[in-house]
Structures are given as structure tokens and as C-alpha cells.
Image: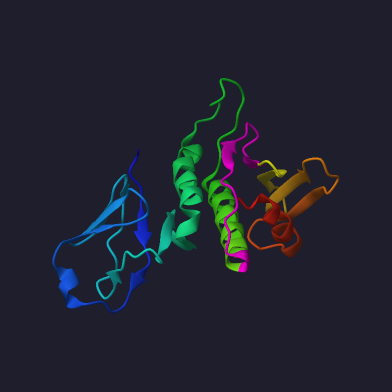
């Protein structure tokens, strides 16, 4: 797996014995070690500020580096965090990446798309104590990004794209399987829309 920046929630005060190199087992099969930086199997963690220390415990959060902007999410959203980091290839796609006329995906569209996903997933977890399913994160030829869920209970497609004079918006359509409870519309990509967040609880696994 490609290495990327992932960091456990830090704590301002820990035992000074943490200055020696210790090993920790956490998050299933992943292993942590601490010296001057935390190394997680498959990932590379950022060195914390000099006055802070890493505290890798089962109750820790994940600190995700999104183009040098850090977003903290619960450990339970690790699968989504991994999908976000794996999607970084999207903004490096060159024009015509689909062997046709596909546009490049701007860093802003990618950044706001993954922040949108992480923010909604975190808010739902904070409200319910449960995690939503991990979506597919796919580039679109028109320069937008799709977030797509298909679960036994619900389907949801969120397309995040730049709209002239309106900024970057999230257009969505969802429905419940075997039900007419549909939702559609658009919302700003940088804010939490309560009605969409409530409906997205149908994606809890």
C-alpha cells in the first residue's frame, strides 16, 4: 500500500518514558512504533509539534492530512480515511485521462469533495455512534467527483462540481431500496446540511 500521512490524536502530556522507543499494537493488525515519529504499517505519520506527543490508544482519533489541512475523525472512520487518501491520484490525472476529452480535476474540487465526505461521516458518527458505509470516490470526465454508495438499504450519489459564479456545490440523489423515500437537490460543499445528514443515516452499516 502506498504510504501517506496519517496521525493518531496527540496529547499534550504523557509519561516521559515515551521518549524511548516503544511498540504498540492497535487498530487490528496495524502496528505502531514511536521514536521521533510514529510509523504505522502501510502509512507514514507526520512528526507532531515539539511540545506535543503522539498517544496511540484505541480511543485515539485519526488526523488526516488533506493538502496540509488536517481533519480529525474517529478511529471508526478508518476505512473512509483510507479511501480518501487513496483517491489523491484524482487531481494528478491529465487532460484526456479517459482516452477522450475528460477534463482535469482541480485540487479544490478534490479537497472539498473529501472534506465533504469526512465532515458528514464524522457528524453522523458523533450523533449516532455509528459509521456510514465507505463510498466509492470516482473522477468524472466533466471535472467533477462522484461519491457513490450502494448498501442493502439505500443508494446515494453525490456529485461535487464547480459551478460558475456559485462555487463548488454538491448535487445529490438518493433512495431507499423498495421504498419511495427519495432525496435530491444540491447544497454548498463546505457546510453541513441537516436534512441531508439525517437522510445519510440510512447509510449506517
Tell me the residue at 55%/43% (across/down). Answer: 106
Quarter of the image where one finds residue 24: bottom left
Name the residue rendered at 67%, 63% in the picture: 192
Image color mode = rainbow
Give the extent of the magenta segment. Answer: 127-150
- The image shows residue 189, relative to residue 15, as above or below, that is above
Q: Residue furthest top?
A: 99
Residue 84 in the figure: left or right of residue 27 = right
Q: Position of residue 20 (x, y in %)?
A: 13, 66
Residue at the limit of the structure toward the bottom, as seen here:
13
Q: Quadrant of residue 124?
A: bottom right
Per the image, is 198 magenta? no
**Residue situated furthest left in the rendering:** 20
Determine whether 58 is above or below 185 in the image: below
Q: 5 left or right of 66?
A: left
Image coordinates of residue 42 in percent, x first then y, are: 32, 44
Residue 186, position as x, y percentages in the image: 76, 52
Q: Is residue 149 magenta?
A: yes
- In the rendered view of the protein, which quadrant contains the N terminus? top left
Q: Which residue is farthest right?
A: 180
- Residue 3 spot, x, y in % from top left: 33, 44
Front position in the image: 45 or 111: 45
Q: How many marks?
A: 0
Judge by depth and name the residue closer to the eye, 103 or 39. Answer: 39
Amino acid at each position: 500500500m502506498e504510504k501517506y500521512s496519517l496521525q493518531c490524536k496527540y496529547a499534550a502530556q504523557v509519561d516521559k518514558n515515551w521518549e524511548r522507543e516503544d511498540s504498540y499494537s492497535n487498530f487490528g493488525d496495524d502496528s505502531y512504533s514511536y521514536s521521533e515519529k510514529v510509523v504505522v504499517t502501510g502509512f507514514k505519520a507526520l512528526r507532531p509539534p515539539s511540545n506535543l506527543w503522539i498517544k496511540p490508544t484505541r480511543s485515539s482519533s485519526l488526523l488526516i492530512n488533506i493538502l496540509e489541512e488536517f481533519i480529525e475523525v474517529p478511529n471508526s472512520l478508518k476505512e473512509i480515511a483510507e479511501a480518501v487518501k487513496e483517491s489523491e491520484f484524482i487531481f494528478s490525472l491529465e487532460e484526456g485521462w479517459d482516452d477522450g476529452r475528460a477534463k482535469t480535476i482541480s485540487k479544490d474540487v478534490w479537497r472539498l469533495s473529501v472534506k465533504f465526505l469526512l465532515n458528514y461521516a464524522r457528524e453522523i458518527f458523533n450523533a449516532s455512534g455509528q459509521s456510514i458505509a465507505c463510498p466509492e470516490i470516482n473522477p468524472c470526465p466533466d471535472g467533477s467527483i462522484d461519491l457513490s454508495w450502494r448498501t442493502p438499504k439505500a443508494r446515494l450519489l453525490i456529485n461535487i462540481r464547480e459551478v460558475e459564479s456559485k462555487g463548488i456545490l454538491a448535487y445529490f440523489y438518493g433512495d431507499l431500496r423498495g421504498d419511495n423515500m427519495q432525496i435530491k437537490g444540491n447544497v454548498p460543499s463546505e457546510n453541513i446540511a441537516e436534512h441531508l445528514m439525517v437522510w445519510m443515516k440510512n447509510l449506517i452499516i
